[in-house]
Image: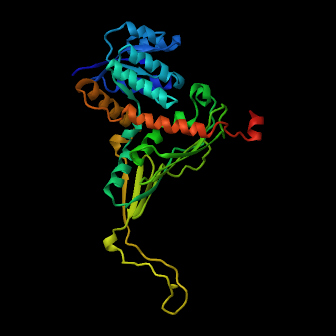
Amino acid sequence: MQKVRTAIIGQGRSGRDIHVAALKLMPEMYEIVAIVDPIEIRRRRAQEELRCDVYESHRALFKRKDLDLVINATPSHLHYPVTLEVLKKGYNCLCEKPLAKKAREVDRLIAASQQSGRMLAIFQQSRFAPYFEKVREVIASGVLGRIVQISIAFNGFARRWDWQTLREFNGGNLLNTGPHPLDQALVLFGDGMPKVLCRMDRANTYGDAEDYVKLLLWGEGHPVIDLEISSCCAYPCFTYNVQGTRGGMKGNTSGMEWKYYRPEEAAPQQLIREPIINPDGTPAYCREQLPWHTESWAVSKENADLFATISGRFYTMLYKRLTTGQPLEITPEQVRRQIAVIEECHKQNPHIYVPKKKAAQA
């Protein structure tokens, strides 16, 4: 079996704990031949653990002709410039999220990919999450009827004080966590650019970027998408809540449940204008007992490790793209729409509100 000779730029939480960890589970497909990191202890550790070449600068990779794939796992603000360099130098590149901060930057990356004839891929692995696939499956089945609203909540309660809380490093919940649920949201929204309304806040962060995001997406002929990414939610109650004309669905990463009625089993109704009354003549409320059908889903044991599942499926897809030419399932053009939405959200929140009490504490 052909192995993809891979270099990874960056050995932080993403480069080491996600990408190295994922590829070590797929030794028949990938071989890590080079690691890049400006921090010496990280280079030494990589050399000891992986027995590969190590470099202080990513530009040292450009002397090599034996690389099939370069993974850009640098800090977020370096994703765009480093990926652009890698593509221009003629290497296939997989970039971590967020791909960029501006849609025009994505356009330049796509152009560089086309000019060099090399692949540009983005690590949107949550597209392969089993819970998300179940949501898509149930919606596509039609049992919930026309989908009116989809609520997505990637919420929790946490204080944070690292570099990913700083706008200068492209930090904040929308650029950090946001690419996961926003990618899913746009798939469920459908084709086209949605209308965007966004409110951001800084609640528990010690940086200057937002840690609360409320985002509404809508458009004619599309469901309303209500997306929350909050670090001040002490009672997270669902990941998905779907509202349809015949029923609904709710659940989280480990399980889903949904209920619906079948129109042919429901009593026929028609609009009336006169007051509704009970048999004894007293006022009545408009109500009925619909024959509900309920179903549920639980993640399987083999998919219980969400990280291993989604990373493995993404990298399997990428391997097929690199070795057989199979099309990418997540394209740069799809990610461009995501970045355009994020850019609009930032435009709508030029000065994130900071309560005076919080500011004084900081």
Judge whether residue 60 can be spotted in this image.
yes
Q: Is residue 219 left or right of residue 297?
A: right
**Quick one: 44 or 112, which is closer to the camera?**
112
Q: Is residue 261 left or right of residue 150?
A: left
Q: Quadrant of the C terminus?
A: top right
Judge whether residue 307 can be spotted in this image.
no
**Quick one: 7 or 44, which is closer to the camera?**
7
- Where in the figure is residue 79, as x and y percent of width and height? 48, 23
- Where in the figure is residue 232, as x and y percent of width and height? 62, 44
**Quick one: 302 or 342, which is closer to the camera?**
342
Image point (41%, 54%), residue name: 221
- Coloring scheme used: rainbow
Q: Is residue 253 left or right of residue 173?
A: left
Image point (31%, 11%), residue name: 66
Q: Is residue 355 above or below residue 97?
A: below
Q: Quadrant of residue 31?
A: top left
